[in-house]
Image: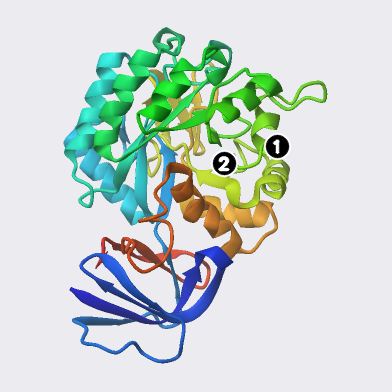
Amino acid sequence: MSVLYKNGKIYVSEQKCFMSGAVTVADGIIDGVYFTDATPSGEFENIIDLDGNYLIPGLIDVHTHGRAGGDFNTADVEVLKRMSESYVNSGVTSVMATLASATLDDLYTSIERVAELKSGESAFIGVHLEGRYLNEKRRGAHAASLLAKPDASEISALVKEMKKTGFAHVSAALELDESGDFTTAALEGGATLGLAHSDATFAEGQRAFERGAISLTHTYNAMSPFHHRDGGSVGAGLLTDGVFCELICDGFHVSPEAVRMAYKLKKEKIVLITDSMEATGMPDGEYFIAGLPVTVRDGRARTHEGAIAGSTLGLIDGVKNLSAFAEIPFSEALYCATASPAKMIGAYGTLGSIDTGKRANMLILDEEYNVKEVIFQGKKI
């Protein structure tokens, strides 16, 4: 099916701006982008007038544990389908299903369930393993009984299964990988790596990035902080060139001034995430994350021990917050929820921008940047 979207303000990712133009889509793929007043020639089965509204790439969440009452660790295939629909309706058209700490058997089961949903039929583009190989001192909402030391053979086998779902990303306390064997095994298997739940010194954090880690998982949270006598994990991530820094931009996990500082240092290497849990899109109440009970009150999730336990943030709201906190245009903040996450996991060849040959996952926004309509795999939802 060929579709023409005309008379819109099209997001141009590499310039981080909007330009008047039109986009053509065929069989779920973008096959033309036009920045002129002329209407593209050809026969179209459907012509949609955007009426001056914004057309942007679908949002990409590379770190989210669940929403709509479902958690990736425990959801069966039917619940996963419901979760996918909820993500897409919220404007998130690409999701890395994020698994918290669990037993090996349970992790394999969770990965297998995600793999059952074919790419293109769901929003899931891979698996992000955030768990098991964490520093107990910085475990946050992860149960201590579920943690394990980094093991090269274990991660090699896990990544092999994760790759069956699409992309694979592993977050771990890489200071515990003294030999580097764990890091090597994950990278050789085709995964990308993030430093997470870490008590690393600045030097240990730098060593992790020198060995091939490319990101800092939910920057500032559950990691050794920046101190004037040692930069810790935070300093290593913010000050190492080329490292992506995930950021939960809800004003609760990270204060507005800390967001602003991170953005000034990292710019387009900021990756907006939600770290959302099953209560997202649901009322306050009692829920679970990483095997622990969680109370959600006023939209804020905490374990019964008082630790922050994920978020209930919507990613489009994270973009708006970054714009406000960092005092930058919405168009600049938008890059961090589209192109940046795609580049972090190696998906920019097919996702993350409105360019010819990429998946036709797009959002129509109104003048207040609210999601009006979702186009998923070339079809309006």
Residue that extends furthest to the bottom in the rendered view of this protein: 38
Amino acid, disc 2 = Phe
Which type of secondary structure does the marked residue at label 1 adopt? helix
Which amino acid lies under the numbered mark 1 shown in the image of this protein?
Leu
Q: Residues within 10 Å of mark 2 (few under 14, many from 20)?
A: many
Q: Is residue 314 visible?
A: no
> Which residue is disc 1 drawn over?
239
Q: Residue at x 22, y 23 (%)?
A: 109
Q: In this view, does 268 lie above or below 46?
A: above
Q: Distance between the residues labelled 2 and 1?
A: 11 Å
Position in image of residue 144 (x %, y %)? 46, 10
Residue 243 image point, x, y percent: 59, 39
Query: Depth check: 239 or 309 in front?
Result: 239
Q: In this view, does 120 lie to the left or right of 8?
A: left
For the point 28% across and 43% down, the residue is 83
Tell whether 265 sits left or right of 250: right
Image height of 145 relative to 71, above or below: above
* Residue 159, image x, y percentages: 33, 27
Labelled disc at residue 84: none
Please give the residue where the numbered disc 2 appears in the rendered image. Answer: 244
- Image position, residue 206 (x, y; %): 65, 27
Residue 165 in view of the camera: yes
Q: In which quarter of the image is residue 114?
A: top left
Q: Residues within 10 Å of mark 1 (few under 14, many from 20)?
A: some
Q: Looking at this view, is 367 or 123 the one in front?
A: 123
